[in-house]
Image (tube, grey):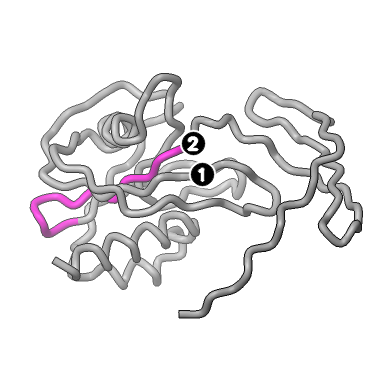
């Protein structure tokens, strides 16, 4: 294992919100690094609540995915249930809620796999990845504009997902590998 020295975080000299939308705030941050070099960066401020993604495994044999519209790429993407953590909600509660809203199952067993960041140079948000097992049918109404198509996928053919053109979201790909690693260790 390689150990590297930790850098001292730069000093924030000034920060201001330069743009705001319903979902995002863009902040300009003026920094001074330990070598006295100053730079300005722009970053999207997160909501500080975080988000969750859930890899559901039904009866130990199938992955359950959803196909839903992604506005950023203007396409339908195949991926795992995900969403924001609501105020006052714990990450595992949000994971179980999103599972029920998006694919119609709840989980009796949720295992936290890892916390991931998304483009940490520009985005402060973190996502908690969970494995969901011992599933039971349970539907909660979500906020999606149209129903999400639930797609079962044989767990033994998990690597074939990587060949699907619409399974391209990096968080879903990462979650797939994390879940597979966890399941193989048992």
Q: Main secondary structure of the magenta part?
A: strand
From the viewer's perspective, tell me whether residue 181 is left or right of residue 144: left
Q: Which residues are magenta?
A: 51-62
Task: Give the residue displayed 22% in from the left and 43% down from the top.
Answer: 110
Q: Are marks 1 and 2 in contact (CB under 8 Å)?
A: yes
Tell me: residue 97, above or below residue 111: above
Q: Earlier in the sequence, mark 1 or mark 2?
A: 2
Q: Is residue 172 magenta?
A: no
Tell me: residue 8, above or below residue 126: below
The x, y position of residue 148, in whole percent, is 35, 37
Displayed quadrant of residue 155: bottom left
Secondary structure beneath label 1: strand
Tell me: residue 28, above or below residue 89: below
The disc placed on residue 126 is 1
Task: Give the residue displayed 71% in from the left and 26% down from the top.
Answer: 21
Task: Give the residue displayed 22% in from the left and 46% down from the top.
Answer: 132
Secondary structure beneath label 2: loop
The x, y position of residue 159, in whole percent, is 31, 72
The x, y position of residue 64, in whole percent, is 24, 50
From the viewer's perspective, tell me whether residue 105 is left or right of residue 93: left
Out of 37 and 150, give the one closest to the viewer: 37
The disc placed on residue 50 is 2
């Amino acid at each position: 294992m390689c150990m590297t020295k930790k850098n001292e975080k730069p000093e924030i000299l000034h920060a201001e919100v330069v743009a705001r939308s319903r979902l995002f705030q863009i902040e300009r941050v003026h920094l001074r690094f330990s070598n006295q070099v100053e730079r300005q960066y722009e970053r999207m401020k997160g909501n500080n609540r975080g988000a969750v993604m859930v890899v559901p495994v039904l009866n130990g044999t199938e992955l359950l995915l959803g196909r839903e519209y992604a506005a950023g790429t203007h396409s339908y993407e195949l991926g795992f249930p995900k969403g924001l953590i609501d105020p006052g909600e714990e990450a595992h509660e949000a994971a179980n809620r999103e599972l029920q809203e998006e694919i119609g199952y709840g989980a009796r067993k949720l295992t936290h796999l890892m916390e991931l960041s998304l483009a940490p140079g520009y985005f402060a948000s973190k996502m908690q990845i969970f494995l969901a097992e011992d599933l039971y049918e349970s539907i909660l109404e979500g906020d999606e504009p149209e129903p999400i198509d639930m797609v079962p996928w044989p767990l033994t053919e998990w690597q074939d997902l990587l060949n699907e053109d619409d399974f391209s979201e990096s968080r879903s790909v990462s979650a797939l590998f994390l879940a597979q690693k966890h399941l193989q260790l048992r």
